[in-house]
Image (cartoon, rainbow, N blue to C red):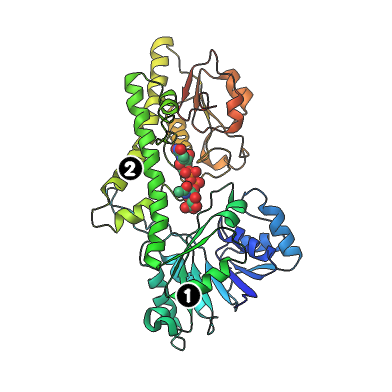
Amino acid sequence: MSFNTVSVIGLGYIGLPTAAMLASKNKKVIGVDINQNTVDTINSGNIHIVEPELDEIVKKAVEDGFLKATTTPEPADAFLIAVPTPFLSKKEESSIPKPDLTYIETAAKSVAKVLKKGDLVILESTSPVGATEQMSNWLAEERKDLTFPHTHGEDSDIRISYCPERVLPGHVVRELVENDRVIGGMTDRCSETSIKFYKTFVKGECLITNTNTAEMVKLTENSCRDMQIAFANELSIICNNFGIDVWELIKLANRHPRINILKPGPGVGGHCIAVDPWFLVESSNGEAKLIKTARERNLYKQNWTILQIESAINNWKDQKKLNPKVALFGLTFKPDIDDLRESPALDIAKFIASKYNNIICVEPNLSADTLSDEKINIVGVDQALEVSDIIVFLVAHESFKKICVDGLNVLDFCGVSKWK
Ligand code: SAJ
C-alpha cells in the first residue's frame, strides 16, 4: 500500500507536526479539525501553535499543495487520529479523574463516513487500555457494510492500530523522525500496514506489539517520569527541613554510576505527565498505589511551594512592618516554551496575586497581551529585579540563568540560580 492520500484528524500539538511531516514527504495530506480558525490559519500557510521549525514546514507544505486543512473528513488511504483525551469533569473533589473519550468517538464516527475497504486507521491519542478496540466498535457501528478487526481479525476490510506519540514539546520536528515507535496492531496485518505508513517519515525503529500493550506503554512512560519527578520533589521538601541544598545533593548523588535523579520544581505541569498517570490509576482496581501517590506528591509540591512563598512574605511583614514587593519569575509549565497548560507556576502566581498586594510576574516567552486574562501583573526582568524585595524563581528559563542573584532575597524552586 502506498498511502498516496493521508488524513490527520486533530491538528494540535501532535497532529499538525505529523501532517506537515507527511506532506514534506510528498504525501497528499488532508488535515481535519473542528476549529474553523485552526483550519483557516493552516490553509493560509501559518500555524496556531509554537513549535520550533514547524512554521517553515507547514508553509512549504501548503504552498506546494501537499497539505490542506478542512473541518470535514474526506476519503484517504490512511487516517491518523490525534485528538485530545481530557478528563471528564469530576463528580466530587476526592474522586479519581476519568478519561473522556468523546473526542475519539466523534473523530471515529466522522472518519467512518468516508472509510473504504483496505483503509488504515491509527489512533495516536493517549488513551486508557482498551480504547483502540472501543474505537473499532464505534467504526463498525457506523459502517455495517465493512468488516473490522475486532470481529473479523486478519480478514477484515479495515486495518486498525494504536501507535502512541512520544515527542517532547520544543523538539517535536526532530523527535517525530528520530524516535522509535511502538505499534500495536489489532492483527499482524494491521501492524505491518502501520509500519509501512510510519516508515514514510520515521527513521527510528518501529516495534510491534498488541494494542493493549501499546496503550499501556504510553501510560507507563509518562507515569514513570511522574514518579521520578515526585522522588525529586519529595527530596526537595526533606532537604528543606534539614537545611540541605537539594541541588547540591542531587548533583552529588548523580555521580553514582547507576543513579539519575531528575530535577525538583514547583509541581508537574503540561497536558501529559500531569494527566496520563490518572488513566492508569482510574482503571487499576486500586493496584496503582505508587503511581497514585506520586501524582498526589507532585500536586502537594505545588501547595508546599505556595506555603513557602507565603511564609517568606509574612516573615518580611513581621520584620519590616511593610508589605514586600514580590516578583515571580516564570509562568509556563516548563522552561523555554510558551505553553501554559496545567502550569503549576501559573496557578501559584494566580493564587499569590489574588491574596497579596505588590505581586508582579515575569514571563519572557509570552507577551503581556496573551496573559491579560490571568489577573496578574506582567513586567520585564530588569524592572522586576529593580523594584522587588523578594525574587521567586518558578521556571528555569535559560534567560533567567544569566541573572546575578548576589545580594538578592531569593526563593528558588527550580534551581535556576544553582543548576548551571
Ligand atoms: N519536570 C520536572 N523535573 C524534571 C523534568 C520535568 O519538574 O526533571 C516537570 C516540567 O517542568 C513540567 C513537567 O515535569 O512541568 C513535564 O515536563 P516533561 O519535559 O517531563 O514532559 P512533557 O510533558 O513536555 O512531555 C512528556 C514526554 N514524556 C516523557 O518524557 C516520558 C514526551 O516524550 C511525551 O510525548 C509527552 O509527555 C506526551 O505528549 O505524552
Q: Position of residue 398 (x, y in %)?
A: 59, 32
Query: Which residue is denoted by mark 1 in the rendering?
Result: 190
Q: Position of residue 8 (x, y in %)?
A: 57, 67
The quadrant in which the C terminus is found is top right
- Which residue reaches farthest left? 286
Asked if one can make out residue 341 in the rendered structure from this viewpoint, the answer is: no
Q: Left or right: where does residue 201 sit relative to residue 154?
A: right
Is tag 1's residue or tag 2's residue first in the polypeptide sequence? 1
Q: Are marks 1 and 2 in contact (CB under 8 Å)?
A: no
Q: Position of residue 289 (x, y in %)?
A: 26, 48
Q: Left or right: where does residue 246 sit relative to residue 404?
A: left
- Which residue reaches farthest bottom? 145
Task: Tell me the quarter of the picture where residue 46 sits.
Answer: bottom right
Residue at mark 1 to residue at mark 2: CA–CA distance = 36 Å
Asked if one can make out residue 234 in the rendered structure from this viewpoint, the answer is: yes
236 to 103, vertically: above or below: above
Residue 294, numbered circle: 2
Q: Residues within 10 Å of mark 2 (few under 14, many from 20)?
A: many
Q: Amino acid at mark 1?
A: Cys
Is 256 or 215 nearer to us in this picture?
256
- Which residue reaches farthest front? 257
Q: Position of residue 247 (x, y in %)?
A: 44, 26
Q: Residue at x 61, y 51 (%)?
A: 174
Q: Residue at x 38, y 49 (%)?
A: 223
**Disc 1 secondary structure class:** helix
Q: Residue at x 76, y 63 (%)?
A: 63
Task: Tell me the quarter of the picture where residue 250 sits.
Answer: top left
